[in-house]
Amino acid sequence: MAPHLHPGPHRQSFHGHAAPAVPHAPDDACADDDFAHDACAPMDDVVCADDDVCLDDLPPKMPPRKPIYRASGSRASREGRGRRDAARERMTKVRHRAVGRVSRRRRRTLMRATRDARAVTTVRTRTRSVRDACSARARGAGTRCRARRNDAEESFRGALDSFAAATLRAIGGVASEVVGGAKGAPIRFPSGPREDVALELAYDPLKFIERASRAHGDAVGLTLAGERVVLVSSPALARDVLLDKSDSFQKEGTAFFPGSSLAGNGLLVSDGETWARQRRLSNPAFRKAAVETYARCMVEVGGRLVRDKWSKRGVRDVYADFNDATLEIVARALFGTDVAGARASKINGAIKDSFEFFGRRAATGMVIPEWAPTFDNIRYNDAVKRLDEEVYAIIAKRRDAAARGDDEGELDLLDRLLRATDDEDVAGSGMSDRALRDELMTLMVAGQETSAILLSWACALIAERPEVGDKIAEEVRELLKSKGVGLDAGDFRHLPYTEACILETLRIRPPAYMVGRCASRDVELHEGVFVTKGTTVLIAPYLVQRDPKYWNDPTAFKPERWLVQSPYSDGTLARDALKNLGPNDAYFPFGGGPRVCIGTGFAMMESVLLLALICSECELRIPPNANPPEPKALITLRLESCELAVAPRPRKI
C-alpha cells in the first residue's frame, strides 16, 4: 500500500462491492483541512468483500482536491478580501470620476444655460432699447411731421383766408351797392373793423369778440359775410334790445344763427303772432307745478348715471355722459311712457340718430347748408324723417286717447301741450300737429344740449376746485339727514350752495354765449347807437358777465358771490339772479325780456339736482398731466374736451 494512503470505512459501491477508500492528501495537507481530520485516521488493513477487487485495482494516485470553503482567517481569504476591497475601491474611484464628469457636465450645461439666459436678456434689453429709440425717433419724426403739416395748413389757411376775405369784401361791397344803394356804412353806424370778419369770427368767436370789444367799445360795427352786424357788450344796450325796445327786433333774418329742419318753426325761431300764440299755449306746460312733476325722472336718471358709469375710479368723458343723460330726461319729460314702453327702442333710436347728426352740424358751425348732398346731411335728413314719423305717430295716438277719455295718469309735456287752448282765440283752438311737432323738437334741441354743456362746465370748474365739490356733498348730506329720504323736486330750493355753483357756471361759461336779434325797423339804442332795418344785433352775455366794470374778480369761479345779501330784495343775490336781466342788468344767461327761455325753470332744477347727486357720490379731479378743459365756441359754448378723473366719494361714518 502506498504510504500516503489509509484504509477508510467500507461503503457499498454501485456494483455491490465495497467502495474503495477515498485517497487523501498527506498529513501535512490534512493539517490545513478543518473538516478532513476524521477521514485521515490510520487504517491497518483493507478488507474487500470480493477477492477479485483489491486496493491495487484502484486508479493510480489522484491529485488532491482544493477545498470548496476556507476558513475566514486564512491567508487566501485575506488576499481575496484585499482584492475585493481593491476592486471595490477602484470601482468607487471610477464611480466618483464618472459622477465628477457628470457633475462637471451638468455645471457646464448650467453655465451655458445661464450664459444663454443672460444673452437672451441682453438681446431683449437691446431690442427694447432699440425699439424705444425707434419709437422716440418715430414720435419725434411724427411731431416734426405734424408741425410741418400744421405750418403748411396754417400757411394755406392764411392764404385761403386772405382770398376769402377779399372775395367776401367784394361780395359785401356789391351787396351794399345793390341793397343800400351806397358803399358807405349807414349814418351813425358804430365803428369797427373795415374788412369782412366772417372767417375770423367763425374760427375763434371768443377771441374775436373780446378783441373787437376792447378795440372799439361796447358797440362794434361789423360786416359779416356781406351783412351788417352790431356787437353789443354793455348792460344798457342789452336792455334796449332784449327788453325795452324788443318789439323793434325779431328772430327772422338774424345772421350767425341758421335755422334747422329739426327744430322747425318753433319758439326758438318764430316771430310775430305765430310766436305769441305758441308761447301762450306752451306756458302752462312750464309752470312751477308742472316742472316739479319731472323731478322724479331727473333724479332717477342721475342716480343711474352715478351707479352705472361713475361708480368706479377712472377717467370719463363727462360731456358724452351728460349728453346721454339729458337726452333721456328731456325725451321722457316730453313723451313720458312712449320712450319707456314697447316703442322705446324705435323712438329712442330715431331721437339719438337725429341729435347725433345735429351735433355734428353744430360742431362745424352749420356752415354747410342742410340741402347740400353730403354724406352726413343725407343721413341727418333721413334720421329727421324717421323721427318725424315716430313723433306724428305718438301725437295721433295721444289725440285718440284724449278723444276716448283714456288720457288719465301722470301728464307729460306732450299731454299738457295737447290740452292747451288759446284764451285769446274765440274758438279756443289748440296746436296743430305741425305746431306740436315743431315745439317738441324745439324743446329737445334747446333743452338737451345746453343742459349737457352747463353740467359739463360745472363739473370741470369743480374739478379745478375740489373743495367746492366737498361743500356740495356736505350740503346734500345735511339735507338728507334731516329728511331721511332721497332728493326730490322740493329739495331744489334747499340746496343754495349747489344752486350758487350752477349760477356761477352760467356766469363765466354761459352755453348761449351770444344772443341774436334782427332789427325789424330803424331804431336808436342807448348811447347814440343807430341800427337800421335788417341789421343783426349780437348781444354777448359772455362779455357782459365777465366785465370787471360789473363784477369783482370776474374770471374767477366763486359760488359764494351769490350767497351774499341782495341789494334788491330781502334774500340772497341768487334769488334775484334770474329776474329781468339780473343784478345790474349784467346777468342774462337765459336771455331776457318777452323771449326769455321758456325752459329756464326746467333747466335750473335739472342742473341743481343732477349736480347735487353727482357731488354727493363722486369726487371730480383734473386727470394727471392734463389741462383744464378749454372752451370751443360755435353756436353754443362747448368744451374742447371734457375728460375728468372720477372716483367714488369716501363715506363718512
Image: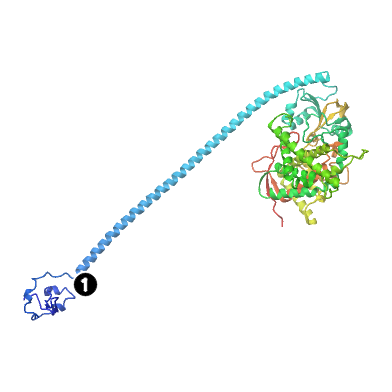
Q: Nearer the viewer, residue 617 or 58?
A: 58
Residue 297 shows up from this direction: yes
Packing grade of label 1 (10 A; few <14, some 14-19, many >=20) is few
Asked whether residue 461 is in view, the answer is no
Q: Residue at x 82, y 18 (%)?
A: 182
User: Looking at the picture, which amino acid does disc 1 mark?
Assistant: Ala
**Quick check: 651 left or right of 551?**
left
Q: What residue did someone put label 1 on?
A: 71
Looking at the image, residue 17 sits to the left or right of residue 483; the answer is left
Report the residue at 52% width, 38% height from top.
131
Q: Quadrant of residue 381?
A: top right
| Residue 231 in which image quadrant | top right
Expressed as whole percent of the image width and height from the top left, the position of residue 214 reads: 78, 29
Residue 383 image position (x, y, % from top left): 73, 37
Q: Is residue 521 left or right of residue 340?
A: right
Residue 375 on image: x %, y %: 68, 32
Residue 402 image offset from top left, x and y in percent: 85, 46
Q: On screen, 21 above or below 634?
A: below
Residue 541, quarter of the rendered image: top right
Label 1 secondary element? loop
Residue ID at (38%, 49%): 109
